[in-house]
Image (cartoon, rainbow, N blue to C red):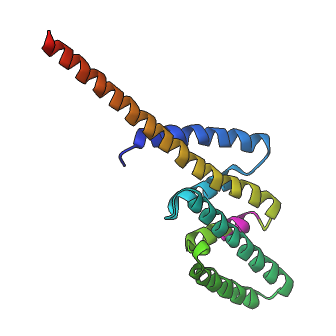
Amino acid sequence: MQHRFQIAISAGLLAALWAGVADVFQLVTWIGFLGCSTFFAQTENGFKGMLMAMTTNLSGVFWGWLIIAGSTFLGSPIISYAITGIVTSIMCLQASHKRLAFIPGAFIGCCITFAMNADIAAIVPPLVIGALLGYSMSLLTDQLITLTKNRQNLSSQVTSVSDNAAKEL
């Protein structure tokens, strides 16, 4: 990893900012970090990556809710197992759609839904913000890399000019 320093700065700053925002607005911090992690785990870059993280995570929230609601409504453990199996298969099959191609994102959203007992109002805001957080970290890292390169180029130009001036003397 060539740009560890820039990644560390952007991740650290924005993680601290997210922790503060989550605390102030009483959002579940770890859900946001899972949304952020989904952004970095999938293969798309930039805005497309953010959309991929959001859509796959949110689809998983829906599927998790469906499993919980269906199992609660139907009441039978055997039917609950069948619903879980069917919905799990659908989560994998949905990856045929380009915007839902990151299967682990769906499973992350589904697991969050299980952990939060399908409290959709507590799940969706930090999960969406988490994808935005990942995208923001990526953008800030890119800016820090550009600044570092510009600084290095300027430094090498100054060194070159001073070396040439010294030769002329």
Question: Looking at the picture, how far across and down is residue 26, in whole percent?
Answer: 79, 46
Question: Looking at the picture, how far across and down is residue 70, in whole percent?
Answer: 80, 83
Q: Is residue 141 left or right of residue 89?
A: left
| Residue lying furthest top | 169
Q: Is residue 76 left or right of residue 150?
A: right
Say if residue 111 shows up in the picture: no
Q: Residue at x 61, y 74 (%)?
A: 100
Total numbered badges shown on the rendered structure: 0
Magenta-colored stretch includes residue 60: no
Q: Residue at x 60, y 59 (%)?
A: 50
Magenta-colored stretch includes residue 114: yes
Looking at the image, is 165 positioned above or below residue 137? above
Question: Looking at the picture, how far across and down is residue 28, in whole percent?
Answer: 73, 51
Q: Main secondary structure of the magenta part?
A: helix
Question: Looking at the picture, how far across and down is residue 137, in whole percent?
Answer: 56, 46
Q: Nearer the viewer, residue 139 or 116?
A: 139
Q: Which residues are magenta?
A: 110-116
Looking at the image, is 19 positioned above or below residue 75? above
Residue 102, image quadrant: bottom right
Q: Nearer the viewer, residue 80 or 5?
A: 5
Q: Residue at x 79, y 44 (%)?
A: 25
Q: Residue at x 50, y 40 (%)?
A: 143
